[in-house]
Amino acid sequence: MTPAQFAATYRPTARTVSEGTGIDDVVLLAQWANETAWGTVVIGNNLGNIRCSPTSFCRYPSLAAFATDCIATFHNGFYNAVLAATTPEAQLAALVASPWSSGHYGGNLHPFYDPLEAYEMTPEEHAWLQEAYKELRGDGTFANLDIIKAELRGDGPHSKLDMIVGTSGLGGGQLDRVEAEVKAIAAPPPANVDLKPVLDAVAQVQAALVTLQAAVTAIKVKTDKDLA
């Protein structure tokens, strides 16, 4: 399997084990990718090659059964350092140093973790995509698309773009304020109009949009990789 195929196939199982252990699901996938040679050798649904005896590996009727036993195995006392780690990097280090894994993974799971992490969105990116999907889907026919386009263009007060800019560190209503300042310039009398507030607001909006564009581009890169 490719890393993308492996992640798509076993991520639900990894999330179940993650919920029962607190271990990052991509860290779990990296361990299982090592154990199964990217899914080419999976015997009895035993992704982690858990042993039932010193000379035999357990066999499970389903991935759900494996997940249950995997959670119990991580809580058997040998993996306390892994459970105590709070970041993926710390969990990887603790995992390769654990009693069974010490020396077994060559002290490094990054060759497996890094290709899988490339397909993992941050919680913020995931939330952005979910919100975009809900907005666009509407009644299931993308009927909201024209409305959203209008909102993003700022046709109404406190547009969605204004709210997005607000999440980037600017105060709410920035676009409305820019519009008001510009209209004030056009209104008589034109003399002695201070353009600095307008220019400052425009600069802030432009900076926020650059940040937003970079975030959207990063999401697209990850999505394109996942679909490749």
Image (spheres, rainbow, N blue to C red):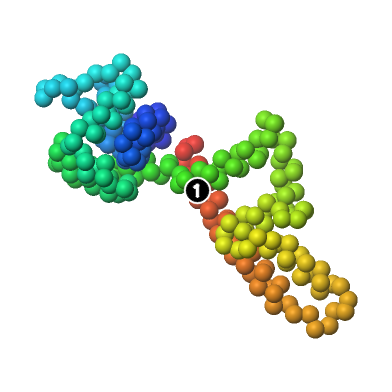
Q: Nearer the viewer, residue 204 or 172?
A: 172
Rendering coords of residue 124 (x, y %): 50, 48
Does 76 appear above or below 90? above
The answer to whether residue 50 is left or right of residue 33 is left
Residue 4 in sight: yes
Rendering coords of residue 197 (x, y %): 69, 74
| Secondary structure under the numbered disc 1 in the rendered image | helix
Does 81 appear above or below 188? above
Q: Residue furthest left?
A: 54
* Occupied quadrant, residue 96: top left
Residue at the location (22% across, 44% down)? 81
Say which residue label 1 marks: 124
Residue at the location (49% across, 36% down)? 227
Rendering coords of residue 225 (x, y %): 46, 41
* Occupied quadrant, residue 64: top left
Residue at the location (18% across, 25% down)? 51
Residue at the location (56% across, 40% down)? 130
Q: Nearer the viewer, residue 110 or 125?
A: 125
Q: Residue furthest top?
A: 61
Rendering coords of residue 220 (x, y %): 53, 46
Residue 40 in sight: no
**Circle 1: residue type:** Glu
